[in-house]
């Protein structure tokens, strides 16, 4: 296939992840954004783009090479599976297919790259799970993590993480100058995905408590993990395990010193990882912090990494530098 002829449709292109997806595709050297959908904005122009939004039902799915479905949970699978049935290769950004439904391959390249290139249907990982899995799987694989104790994860996301549809609890007056936990007690919908990913990535269960928080910034996720480690293990060994796992990875930035913050990562496709020693504890712990952009490495950027792998482009095309 002539690379510049790879046509791409974004279903749900008026939402936060869909907008990002359309923007990345429009400037990609190989993909051509052919369709962008919105039910509420059908007929309106996309900013900075010659296209107009169409309704999802108007997209000729059989004529498009790759379809990115960026719809709310519960709405996305139907379109992803319809596009796949019509013959398109599909990347679904929603949680709908992350359990492997429809034969979907879980698309986290840094951990499971070899499965993605030949995949016809990819379930793009959730934003919170991306940072947790990239942080913890190499530590568990190299035996540093003490599985008999519980990893505590405090995570905070900017408000774009909740999507673009109107919600009273996400009004500026409700979130500004506030900071709150939600989905506490391992009830957040990402918990099963995190559990499965940790188990699959490391060959055994890893107990954890995941507490997400709503941070009143537009974008970015910061995850603070209290990681029980084996006797004699400190931050230096954690960093060494990451270096061994991610030496060749463009989108994992390892901080030799200090911890990452959101300003290090927003508007880019990298996850930044840092680790610090913890003093005066009964049993050894290492503090791990992961930071990344929820709409890029947590969604559209990672989806484009997957698409690049599926269509034989450089994995970094359209993503590095951003
Ligand atoms: N936001 C994040 O940080 C993030 C990160 C990772 C994964 N995700 C996942 O990605 C998906 C999209 O998230 P988002 O934040 O981009 O959501 P969003 O901002 O609410 O956008 C949803 C999009 O879907 C369209 N849509 C809604 N219902 C539809 C339907 N029944 N038929 C066709 N189109 C429909 C909307 O179009 P109109 O309303 O214009 O018609 C809009 O374009 C979700 O499943 C989410 O869990 C989000």
Image (cartoon, rainbow, N blue to C red):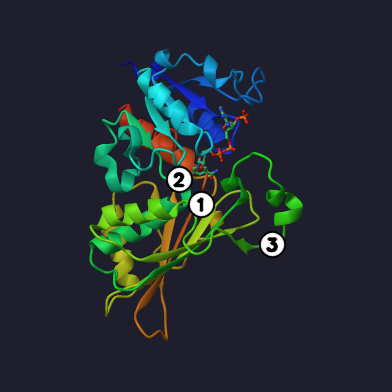
Q: CA distance from mark 2 to mark 1?
A: 9 Å
Q: Residues within 10 Å of mark 2 (few under 14, many from 20)?
A: many
Q: Secondary structure at mark 3?
A: loop
Residue 299, compared with residue 24, is above or below; it is below
Q: Are marks 2 and 1 in contact (CB under 8 Å)?
A: yes
Label 1 crowd (10 A; few <14 / some 14-19 / many >=20): many
Q: State the separation of the CA atoms marked 1 and 3.
A: 22 Å
Quarter of the figure with residue 16: top right
Secondary structure beneath dot 2 equals helix
Q: Quadrant of the N terminus?
A: top left
In front of the other: 91 or 150: 150
- Decide which of tag 3 and tag 2 comes sooner along the chain: 3
Residue 253: name its quadrant: bottom left
Q: Would residue 309 be found to the left or right of residue 96 on screen?
A: left
Label at residue 297:
2
Query: Measured from the top left, where is residue 117 in percent x and y?
Result: 28, 33
* Residue highlighted by disc 1: 265
Residue bearing mark 3: 178
| Residue pictured at 27% horizontal, 63% vertical | 140
């Amino acid at each position: 296939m002539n690379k510049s002829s790879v046509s791409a449709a974004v279903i749900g292109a008026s939402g936060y992840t869909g907008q990002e997806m359309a923007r990345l595709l429009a400037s990609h050297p190989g993909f051509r954004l052919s369709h962008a959908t919105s039910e509420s904005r059908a007929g309106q122009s996309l900013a900075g783009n010659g296209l107009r939004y169409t309704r999802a039902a108007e997209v000729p799915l059989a004529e498009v090479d790759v379809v990115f479905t960026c719809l709310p949970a519960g709405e996305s699978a139907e379109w992803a599976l319809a596009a796949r049935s019509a013959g398109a290769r599909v990347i679904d950004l929603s949680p709908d297919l992350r359990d492997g439904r429809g034969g979907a391959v879980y698309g986290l390249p840094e951990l499971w790259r070899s499965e993605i290139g030949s995949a016809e249907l990819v379930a793009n990982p959730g934003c919170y799970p991306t940072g947790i899995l990239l942080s913890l799987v190499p530590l568990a694989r190299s035996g540093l993590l003490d599985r008999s104790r519980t990893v505590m994860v405090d995570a905070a996301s900017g408000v774009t993480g909740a999507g673009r549809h109107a919600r009273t609890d996400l009004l500026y007056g409700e979130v500004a100058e506030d900071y709150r936990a939600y989905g506490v007690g391992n009830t957040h919908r990402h918990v099963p995905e995190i559990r499965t990913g940790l188990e699959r990535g490391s060959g055994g269960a890893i107990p954890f408590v995941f507490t997400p928080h709503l941070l009143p910034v537009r974008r970015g996720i910061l995850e603070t993990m209290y990681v029980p480690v084996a006797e004699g293990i400190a931050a230096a060994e954690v960093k060494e395990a990451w270096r061994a796992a991610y030496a060749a990875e463009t989108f994992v930035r390892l901080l030799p010193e200090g911890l990452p913050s959101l300003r290090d990562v927003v508007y880019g496709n990298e996850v930044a990882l840092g680790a610090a020693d913890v003093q005066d504890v009964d049993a050894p712990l290492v503090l791990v912090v992961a930071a990344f952009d929820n709409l890029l490495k947590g969604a559209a950027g990672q989806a484009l990494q997957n698409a690049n792998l599926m269509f034989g482009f450089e994995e970094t095309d359209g993503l590095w530098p951003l």
